[in-house]
Each structure stands twice: as C-alpha cells, then as structure tokens.
Amino acid sequence: MLIGRQYLEVEITGGEYKGKIFQIQNSMSRFFNFHAEEGMDMLFSVRKESNGTIRAEMYGYNREGFVYGLIALFFAVLIIIGRKKGLYSILSLVFTVVIIVFFMVPRITEGRSPIIASIITAALTTAVTISMVSGVNAKSLAAVIGIVLGVATAGGVSMIAGRIAHISGLHTQHASEMIYLSQEIGIRVPELLFAGIIIASLGAVMDVGMSIASSVFEVYSVDRRLSLAELYRSGMNVGRDIIGTMSNTLILAFAGSSLNTLIIIVLYKLPYIRFINLDLLGVELIQGISGSIGLVLTVPITALCAAFLVTKKGVKG
C-alpha cells in the first residue's frame, strides 16, 4: 500500500466534460487509496464550483470491464462443463437477478412487507430454476414444495428468535441510513433482516431439496415395489448424510461475511458478558441458525413429498 500524494494530469473521456484535461492532486491514505499509473482508466467526479471553477477529483478504479469479464468467464465454465444444463443454469440465474431487482426490491421500496416479497421471490425463483434444470414433472414439484416450505421456516424461526432476543433489522449494517432514506417511503426496515435470511438461505436449501427429490425418484426407478414409507426412509438416509456436511454452510457463510468485525471484537478483548450480548453476535446467530434449521427441515419435507408423488398412481418423475 502506497501512502502519500500524486500529481496527475488526467483527460476526461466521457460525460459532460469529455475531452477536458485537468491537473489534480491525488492523496492516498490507508482508507482512501487509489494509486494511478500512466494510461490507467480511472473514475473521476467533475463538478462546477459556485465561483465557476471546474474541479475534478479521483473517485476510484474503473472495474466495469473486469466485472463483465468475470461474469463471462463464469458463464463459459457453466456451459463447457454443464452443457445444456449449464445453459439452463445461466437462464435461471438471470431470472433470479431480474426477479430480485425488478420485483422484490421495488415492492420493498414501495413500503410493502419485505418478508412477503422475499417469500414470493423465493417461490418464483425456485419454480423457474428447478423447472429449467429438472423439467416440469413430479420430481420438480416435490423439490419446489420442500424448498419453499424450508425457506419459509427459516424466515419464521428468525422472526420468532428476533422477537425473543429483541433483535430486528434495526441492528443490521446501514440500518440508520435506511431509516433516514425511507422517511418519506415507509420502508419496513425492521423486517429487512428476516427477508434477507430467506433470500440468503435459498441457494443452500434449493441444493438440498433437489438432491433429496432426485434421490427418492432414482431409488424408485430401480425398485418400483418400494412403499411410501420405504422411499421416505431412503430419502431421509440420504438427507442425513447431506445434513452432516451442509449444517455448517450457512453459519460459515454469515460468519465469513463478518470476519473483519469479529476480529476487531477479539482485539478489543471484550468481557464475556458483553460479548455474548452483542447485537452483532445475536444477528449472526439468528441468520446462521435459522437458515440452517430451514435447511435441515427441508430434508423430511422434500422426502415425504417425493415419496408420496412418486408412489401416487399415474404420476411419473
């Protein structure tokens, strides 16, 4: 990390002041550190002062090309390895992004319930993703039912836990900014924590639900004499193995996102009584444990639904 000052001559290549050249001073500190090199594409904020002077300031690195390049690499790997299923995965991923950006977020900013919006988003995303990957059939239906009920359970457990522990979305990062920005809109900030848990746990729950449904239908295709109870036990046996490795997934994901904060807490050497009662710790526990409970309960729900549908007369996977 370089700390100090740079004296730069920059040319603006876009916007209202395109083609203008400025001489600026770029100050680099530990918190604002953008080191410019000759020919580098950087971002600048250009504005006109009250006295008519036009001023340019360093804003950051231009990462647009990198972002799209990384996404293209991800899509290429999916198509090369997954082929047709990989293409369907890309389409389902695009649908997920669209439904979150153009459906869930607008509903929340309109002042509607974030929890209801997130459950509807989860249901739509699950239905489209599973249908694209596995087709429209009984196996997909069993997976969708288990997944939706699993994430709904995660949201319900988090809400109950939040009420008992007196924790809500007001304890999350940027809550104060959200409250300020939503004064005229009426965003339900306290519900955002629980809506976020539903969306954050959806990926892992979807993985588990699809795995259980596929295993039950595969077992039945090998031996069609198996009863509903036997198929359910087979699904649960597979599910217990999955639970053994997946139970840590969401807890580690939420803990990893707050690693810097956890390290700072340790360095401050807080007394146990203060540490165990921190809002941050409560939020992370609710996020990780409620999501994991929803994931675990997805196993028996999906196994039962799959066993019922696969043994129902006239229903094929």
Image (cartoon, grey):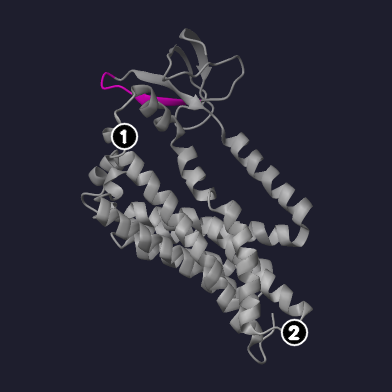
Q: Which mark is residue 224?
A: 2
Q: Position of residue 60 (x, y in %)?
A: 48, 25
Q: Is residue 239 above or below residue 224?
A: above
Disc 1 marks a residue whose amino acid type is Phe
Which residue occupies 65% across, 86% down? 311
The residue at 52%/14% (across/down) is: 1
Q: Residue furthest bottom?
A: 313
Can residue 274 be seen here? The reply is yes
Residue sitting nearer the eye, 307 or 241: 241
Quick check: marks 1 and 2 in contact, CB under 8 Å? no
> Which segment did they paint magenta?
43-51
Residue indicated by mark 1: 275
Mark 1 closeness class: few <14, some 14–19, many ≥20 residues within 10 Å: some
Residue 267 vs 316, above or below: the answer is: above
Q: Position of residue 33 (x, y in %)?
A: 47, 18
| Place of residue 40 in the rendered image (x, y in percent of width and height, measured from the top left) | 59, 20
User: What element does badge 1 sit on?
Assistant: helix
Q: Is residue 193 magenta?
A: no
- Residue at (54%, 70%) from the top-left corner? 300
Q: Amino acid at mark 2?
A: Arg
Q: Quadrant of the C terminus?
A: bottom right
